[in-house]
Amino acid sequence: LQTKNMYQMSYHASLAEKKAMKLLKEIDPKAKIGVVNAVQNVYPYSSSPEDVLAAMDAEELMMYMLLDMSVKGEYSFRVKNILEKMNCSPVKEDGDDEILHAVQPDFIGINYYSSICVKENKTATVNYQLPPFFRSSMFEVCPNEHLKKTKWMANGIDPLGIRSIIYKIYNRYSLPIIITENGMAYSDVLENNQIHDDYRIDYLKSHIKEVLIAKEEGYPIFGYCPWSFIDVVSSHQGFSKRYGLVYVNRTDEDVMDCKRIKKDSFYWYQKVIESNGEKL
């Protein structure tokens, strides 16, 4: 029932999104509207046909399902069949299809942090410890042995994955792309009122290089936004997990003075944007 409700809620979210887009176009016909998705570049664990199909299914459910609704106003044939097998097909009402096909976005925003790896789910059991859309009887999330992992980047650091995602998203939807989130999580340590976060610089540098390759190839990428400018509260790990270019001096237990301290990555990224990416 929990899984069924999850897919019903996602369907309602897609309906609400379309209504909002239609209303904005009525208010300002010249407005440019984009949708943002936390994308999952999925690799098969092996070259076995079963693992490859599992990876395709994972991408359908975890990435394309919501984007298909945003752009095309309907699920793919594969998603429709998977949801039917799971007994999770959303309940639709009269007039929904008209709403879903009434308007399309003008561009797509991509939130990318890391890729994932999956294999065939031979037991068809569902791991309910995983985040909602990672749970499935169709595939099993597994470690990718080819990627370097850290405490907060448990799936591994995969710069090439962001370029692969750009290819996949544009080839499916033919819409301009902006990278709306991309960043490195770390438990930064303040030393002598400084944060030396070379690991974050390395992460951002390697990912921006891949984005620029796709742009130079002709893909219509019109922006890149790192996550995040300043340390913010992580949804599950509080201030232990930090993404910011600017440090906030506090912990989960002690507010302290909340002083803002620019990390090394701040000064590095300042030069990157001043040079429009030439000083990577």
Image (cartoon, grey):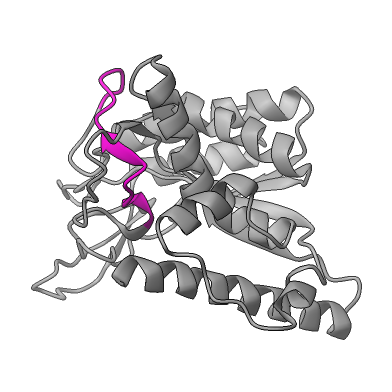
Say which residue appears at 70% left-offset and 78% top-offset. 96
Q: Which residues are magenta?
A: 133-148
Question: Does 17 sit left or right of 29 as displayed?
Answer: left
Residue situated furthest left in the rendering: 253
Q: Is residue 90 something that shows in the picture?
A: yes
Q: Quadrant where the C terminus lies?
A: top right
Of the pair 167 and 265, the residue shown nearer to us: 167
Question: Does 103 sit left or right of 162 as displayed?
Answer: right
- Answer with the quarter of the image where residue 24 lies: bottom right
Q: Position of residue 196 (x, y in %)?
A: 26, 38
Residue situated furthest right in the rendering: 29
Question: Does 247 sit left or right of 179 as displayed?
Answer: left
Main secondary structure type of the part rendered in magenta: loop
Determine if the magenta segment contains residue 137: yes
Determine if the magenta segment contains residue 274: no
Total labels: the figure holds: 0
Of the pair 135 and 245, the residue shown nearer to us: 135
Q: Quadrant where the N terminus lies?
A: bottom left
Say which residue appears at 66% left-offset and 48% top-offset. 178
Of the pair 143 and 123, the residue shown nearer to us: 123
> In the rendered view, would you say 217 is above or below 243?
above
Q: Position of residue 167 (x, y in %)?
A: 65, 31
Q: Position of residue 274 (x, y in %)?
A: 63, 41
Q: Position of residue 20 (x, y in %)?
A: 70, 80
Residue situated furthest top in the rendering: 47
Q: Is residue 206 something that shows in the picture?
A: no
Say which residue appears at 30% left-offset and 23% top-offset. 147
> In the rendered view, would you say 24 is above or below 121?
below
